[in-house]
């Protein structure tokens, strides 16, 4: 399948787009968010996989990263863990706030279907996905990989349980992840089970997986994630996750 990649800046945000090999525009759209210190280019294989499933795949360079990298980003990453985590979540929150504008811009261009939008993020991007569910944008599905809804300061996403009931949420964590322990995501899904039984969500904890997964462990992610997107985004636009 011929997947076409294109780098561009939309609404002031650098993007890497992977177009599906079909004439179905506007396409159902998946935004992909990378980890702390890297950029959208490192996820070309994942963007290709998503585009092959029939989505417009949009890799986003997060605030302070990629083509808008902060000159002192590496120094910030090298700070003690708690300080680096605060920097990371601030940049994630800034990026999450840009999502409604990106959806509007791509929809106005005629390439994104605003009624079929999903988010996927890994590590810092996983934190970002949880925060984005608080933004004023309609999302059909969200996949957080190796992220946490519990933030060290400010308005932590986990405090807004109702926000997680509007979107089909898949969280994937690693059992032995020391960088982002699975406790926060696990607790969120337990609360959803207890307080919102009609919410559509799934929690996957990969046995023995550290933050830097091996090939077999990442293959589990790349099996779970597309199936979730295909189930909850490639459905008629008038349906909702709870249906």
Image: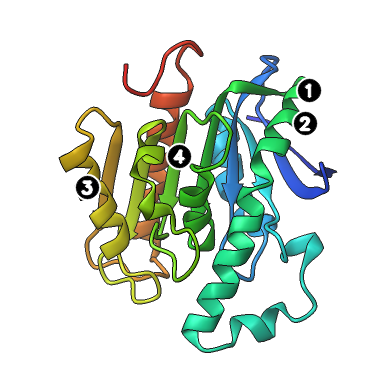
Nearer to the camera, 23 or 82: 82
Residue visible at 31% across and 61% down in the picture: 184
Label 4: how many Cα within 10 Å (few below 14, some 14–19, many 20+) = many
Label 2: how many Cα within 10 Å (few below 14, some 14–19, many 20+) = some
Which quadrant holds the C terminus?
top left
Give the SS element for disc 4: strand
Which residue is denoted by mark 4 in the rendering? 142
Q: Position of residue 235 (x, y in %)?
A: 45, 16
State how far apart marks 4 and 1 are (Cα).
22 Å
Q: Position of residue 166 (x, y in %)?
A: 40, 30
Disc on the earlier residue, 3 or 2:
2
Residue visible at 77% across and 72% down in the picture: 70
* Residue 214 in the figure: left or right of residue 125: left
Nearer to the camera, 162 or 203: 162
Q: Position of residue 230 (x, y in %)?
A: 44, 27
Which residue is denoted by mark 1 in the rendering? 108
Which quadrant holds the N terminus?
top right
């Amino acid at each position: 399948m011929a997947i076409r990649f294109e780098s561009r800046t939309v609404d002031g945000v650098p993007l890497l787009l992977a177009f599906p090999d079909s004439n179905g525009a506007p396409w159902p759209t998946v935004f992909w968010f990378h980890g702390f210190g890297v950029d959208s280019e490192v996820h070309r294989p994942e963007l290709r996989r998503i585009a092959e499933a029939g989505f417009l795949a949009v890799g986003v360079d997060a605030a302070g990263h990629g083509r808008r990298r902060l000159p002192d980003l590496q120094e910030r990453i090298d700070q003690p863990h708690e300080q680096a985590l605060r920097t990371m979540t601030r940049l994630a929150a800034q990026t999450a706030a840009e999502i409604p504008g990106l959806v509007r811009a791509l929809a106005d261009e005629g390439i994104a279907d605003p009624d079929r939008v999903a988010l996927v993020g890994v590590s810092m991007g996983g934190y970002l996905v949880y925060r984005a569910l608080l933004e004023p944008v309609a999302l059909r599905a969200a996949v957080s990989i190796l992220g946490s809804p519990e933030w060290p300061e400010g308005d932590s996403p986990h405090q807004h349980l109702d926000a997680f009931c509007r979107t089909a949420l898949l969280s994937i964590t690693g059992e032995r992840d020391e960088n982002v322990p699975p406790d926060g995501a696990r607790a969120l899904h337990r609360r959803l089970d207890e307080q919102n039984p009609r919410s559509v969500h799934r929690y996957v904890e990969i046995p023995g997986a550290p933050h830097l997964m091996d090939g077999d462990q990442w293959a589990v992610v790349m099996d779970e994630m597309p199936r979730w997107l295909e189930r909850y985004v490639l459905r008629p636009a008038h349906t909702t996750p709870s249906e």
